[in-house]
Amino acid sequence: MINFEAVSTIASEAGDTILNIYNRKTPIEITTKGDQSPLTEADLAADKVITEQLLNLDPKIPIVSEEGRVGDPLISTYCWLVDPLDGTKEFIKRNGMFTVNIALMCRDGMRWKPVFGVVHAPVSKTTWLGGVDIPSEKRLNGQSTSIFINQKTDNEVTRLVASGSHRGEKDESFAEAIGEHELIRMGSSLKACIVAEGSADLYPRFGPTSCWDIAAAHAVVTGAGGVVIGPEGTTLDYDLVENVLNPYFLVAADSRWNDLWVASQTS
C-alpha cells in the first residue's frame, strides 16, 4: 500500500528546495539540454530530493523523471513519473507559475495511465492531489478542500485557460470555434489544476509537451470529475519509454467539447 500522504510531503519538500534557490540573491545557474530547453540547478536539486525519497518509500517502483531514470518501467506494473520543476522558463522569469509534479502510473501493455498525482506550487504553497480512486483536493495554509470540475450551465461564458508563453494559430482557431469565452493566462501544469478546481472549463494544448508535464495534473483532473483526451477524443495515455512526447490534448470539465476538439485536429 503506497502512502500517498508521504508523496505529497515529498513534493512540498522539493518545492522548498526550489524556493531556496528561487529566493537567492545570486544568479541562478542555467544550462541548455539537447532539446534546447533550459536546465537549472533547481531542477537538479529538486530531482535529487524526489528520487531519494521515492526510493525510500518503495525501492521496487521505478522512477522516470525529466532529469533521469531509476529502474526499468517495463518490468513493473507501476512507475513514478516526475517533473521536478515544471515551468523552468517561468522559474527563470521569477513569475511564480511553476510546479513540482509527481504521478503514479499504471502500465497497460506498453502504455501508461496515471492513477494518482500531486502538483505542488512552491511560491503559493498550494498543493493539488487526487486520482482514479482518490477524490481530488486542494491544500493551502493548512486547510484541505475537496475540489470538483465546474458543472457549467448553458448561459455561462466558457473559461478557457492558455499558456502564458505558448499560443499559436490552432489555439486561436479553437478558441474562436468555442464562441464567447474568457481567456485565463497561466503557466505549467497549473492550467490543468484550475480546471480541476472549477476555476476554468477548458485547457487545449496544441504545443509540444512530454509525459511528465501533464500526467500528475491528469490524475488530479480525473479525481475531480474532469476528462483529459487526446486527438481522437479518447482518454489520453502515455509512453514512458520509447516516445515521451505527448500528442495534442484537451483538459476539460466534461465531454461536451469533445466533438469540437476532434474536428479541430484536421482544420
Image (cartoon, rainbow, N blue to C red):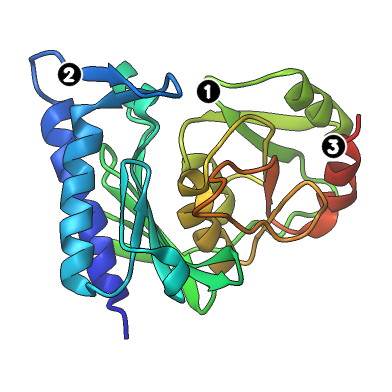
Q: Quadrant of the C terminus?
A: top right
Mark 1 or 3: in front is 3
Mark 2 or 1: in front is 2
Which three-letter amino acid code belongs to the residue tagged 1? Gly
- The residue nearer to you, when weighing 63 against 101, is 63
Q: CA distance from mark 2 to mark 3?
A: 39 Å
Q: Residues within 10 Å of mark 1 (few under 14, many from 20)?
A: some
The answer to whether residue 13 is seen in the rendering is no
- Residue 5 lies in what quarter of the image? bottom left
The residue carrying mark 2 is 28
Rendered position, 262 above or below 102: above
Residue 61 in picture, x, y percent from top left = 32, 71
Q: CA distance from mark 1 to mark 3?
A: 22 Å
Residue 50 in picture, x, y percent from top left = 22, 54
Q: Residues within 10 Å of mark 3 (few under 14, many from 20)?
A: some
The residue carrying mark 3 is 265
- Residue 206 lies in what quarter of the image? top right
Q: CA distance from mark 2 to mark 1?
A: 22 Å
Image check: 82 left or right of 162? left
Which three-letter amino acid code belongs to the residue tagged 3? Gln
Q: Residue at x 31, y 46 (%)?
A: 68
Q: Which mark is residue 164?
A: 1
Furthest residue in direction left, as rendered: 25
The answer to whether residue 196 is seen in the rendering is yes
Which three-letter amino acid code belongs to the residue tagged 2? Ile
- The residue nearer to you, when weighing 207 against 261, is 207
Q: Quadrant of the N terminus?
A: bottom left
Of the image marks 1 and 3, the number of the one nearer the N terminus: 1
Of the image marks 2 and 3, the number of the one nearer the N terminus: 2
Q: Residue at x 29, y 62 (%)?
A: 143
